[in-house]
Amino acid sequence: MNTERMALTFGDAGENHIGNQMLGEKGKIGSGLTIEDLNLLKVYFESLGFVCELIDLGSILDEVAKEGKTDEIMNWGFPAGILIIRRFIEKETRLKLYEELEVIPWDRKYWDTRRKKVLNKNARANLVFVDGFEQEPDYENKKGRVVDSLKLETLSSVKTSLMTAIDTGLSEGGSITKSIQYICEGNRYYDLKKCGIGFHGDKERTRVICLSLGVNDYKMRWVWFYKSKPIAPPTEIKLNSGDVYIMSEKAVGYDWVKRIIPTLRHAAGAKKYINLDKYVAE
């Protein structure tokens, strides 16, 4: 368990690989979590006894704008932030969940839409978990393995507890953000020295609530980009097993392919994935 990391990303939509079958349905722009929602959730989870950290990503962009790196763009989008809930699940539950997920065959192949053939996954393994639905992989038709999350006792219990707490925290705080049905996209970084994911945004969804499982002190970074170039230093967090992080809609990076406004990208894992060397070289 301490030799790898599993990221269980609960969102409005998910996929086994980019360009492959989409599960769930992307929410409308503006329907995701706001920075105000994250503040409400921080207050609520702290009232339950959890240690929380709220990271404001927007303030960094304000400094960048003052330096003229955004061509004096004023309306750059929603304020952005990340809420971390430390040790949402205790050790016994973490072990049960890991044992439950470890025995399932994770996808190590995918359909490459550019090369038009099935290739091996080398950076990570994937699985999608959906309540009441399952399928065997059919990579040639862009379909990966889907596991019925209702058949996984620990995962189902953790998901229910987490989403119930989030819905309650938002409701009690007076948020107008609506509750949704979440699917779970799993990423398994099975080799900590080789696996990871480079800087990107999640254009397929507007919500991200992610549970980290496995190794401690796992690095993730967020960086502001403009005209396809980084314009600010990375914001780094370190995740422990059982931690949950929640992104505001802007932090998710649903708009990351746009060049004419500042957008956020995130990366995780081995050093080659989370550094900005290739952008400096360009």
Image: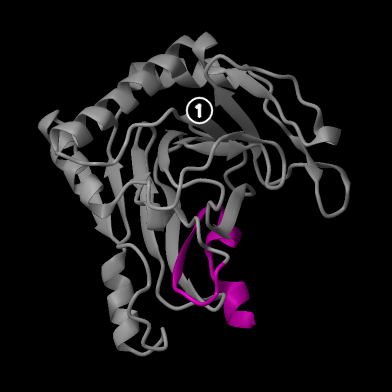
The answer to whether 10 is drawn above or below residue 230 in the figure is: above
The residue stretch that appears in magenta: 258-282
Task: Determine if the magenta segment contains residue 167.
Answer: no
Q: Is residue 69 above or below residue 39?
A: below
Residue at 54% from the left image edge and 35% from the top image edge: 3
Q: Mark 1 — residue?
A: 1
Check residue 281 for magenta coloring: yes
Q: Residue at x 59, y 49 (%)?
A: 196
Q: Relative to the observer, which residue lies in front, 162 or 101?
A: 162
Please tell me which residue is depicted at 23% across the width and 51% down the height of the picture: 54
Tell me residue 141's x, y (percent). Answer: 83, 34
Q: Is residue 79 left or right of residue 132?
A: left
Q: Position of residue 170 (x, y in %)?
A: 21, 36
Location of residue 155 in the rendering, given as x and y in whole percent from the top left corner: 45, 18
Q: Secondary structure at mark 1?
A: loop
| Image coords of residue 240 (percent x, y) | 37, 39
Q: Work out whether residue 159 or residue 213 is closer to the camera in this orientation and state it.
A: 159
State whether residue 95 is above or below residue 191. Answer: above
